[in-house]
Image (cartoon, rainbow, N blue to C red):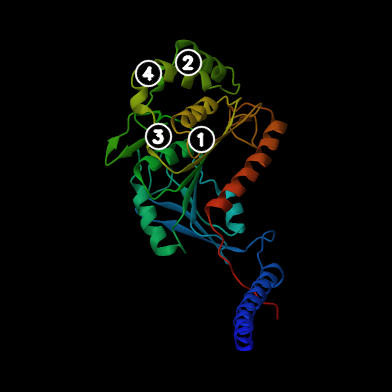
Amino acid sequence: MFIGRKQYIGNGGINLKKKLLISIVVIIVAIILVGVFNDNQVKEVPIKGSEVKGEYMNGFHLKPEVIRYKGVIITFGGSEGGCNGDIAETLAKKGYEVLALYYFGKENQQKVLNEVPIEFFQEVITYMEKECNSVNPLTIIGGSKGAELALVLAEYYDEIDNLVLYAPSSYVFMGLDSNKTASSWTYNGKGLPYIDLINASFESIKQVNEEYASNVPMTFRPMYESAIKNSRNKEAARIKVENYKNNIILFAGCEDKLWPSDTMAEQIKNKKPKNTDLYLYPNVGHVIGGLAEYDNLKMGGDVEESQKAKKDSDEKLYKALKSWHKKIWIFKFKQ
């Protein structure tokens, strides 16, 4: 009996030792993570920016000295021709690897926003595979026409895991070329079906012409709304978002005077309810955090409300990115 009890105690001792050892390891790791491990949640990371240029690709590669998160974020600007550089720099300083890309207006690209070949994105994918720390997940952030482009790309490229769209479009619209009426986007040399503003109502066209003649900011929303309503090919021109199975976040102002981004965002949500989050902001115009008027264009909304929406949308953006792009744990031991 004594031997049996001794054996029992011995086995129990071994099990107890294992449990104690595991507990000690867990405690040590916890101490490292909390105290010695440098998470750098608040401090900005220095970044290195380099220009990237290919056959069509053009923009900047923003690489943090310490990459905190897996994957890549791509940013597109709107019809102004930018690359959304502000948000790109902000995210890079938080530890994300970012490509801020132009899609027209550069010497190796379409001079105006018309007939942009979306297959340039394959060149972007090839570049990321060679030059980026990791390519998964891939998130695209686009605003206005850049949001339209991002949604179109998601229809053609399975590599895209997440979309964040500001003032989005649910349709392909005509390009912005005064000399040629065509689609904004092409694929393999063929223009994608598009909504032509020639279908806009006479009243909406007259309003814009009168505003232009009077040198007051122009309101284009009625033109876009009536063009959608009157177009016979609107289903063909609608971007088939329901074929995209991954994550989408939509931000739009309900007082958008440039185009009906709020109702188009609702359409996107209705066509793809799963994995799609929609945030609409009352009294906010086309540019969240921007001015009510810009470059003789009426953007809409109240500036103060727009700033509040900017803060809220930024918080939602950062939270989503952290959930999509897993953290790369980097240990820094104190000397």
Task: State the image coordinates of residue 76 (x, y, percent, origin top left).
Answer: 49, 44
Helix, strand or loop at mark 3: helix
Are there few (<14), some (14-19), or many (20+) residues within 10 Å of tag 2? some
Label 4: element kind:
loop
Badges 1 and 3: C-beta atoms under 8 Å apart? Answer: no
Is label 3 or label 2 in front?
3
Secondary structure category for the residue under label 2: helix
The disc labelled 4 sits on which kind of residue? Answer: Ser
**Residue drawn at (37%, 29%), measured in percent from left and top?**
179
Of the numbered discs 2 and 1, the one sitting upstream in the chain is: 1
Do callouts 3 and 2 mark residues in contact (Cβ within 8 Å)?
A: no
Mark-to-mark CA distance, 3 and 2: 32 Å
Instruction: Calculate the distance from the C-alpha at mark 4 to the C-alpha at mark 3.
Output: 21 Å
Disc 1/disc 4 C-alpha distance (Å): 21 Å
Query: Quadrant location of the N terminus?
Result: bottom right
Residue shown at the point (48%, 33%) measured from the top left: 273
What residue is pinned by disc 2? 205
Which mark's residue is nearer the viewer, 2 or 4?
4
Name the quadrant containing residue 212.
Answer: top right
* Lower position in the chain sequence, tag 1 or tag 4: 1
Which residue has dot 3 on it?
A: 242
Question: Would you identify the image quadrant in which residue 295 lies?
Answer: top right
Quadrant housing the C terminus: bottom right
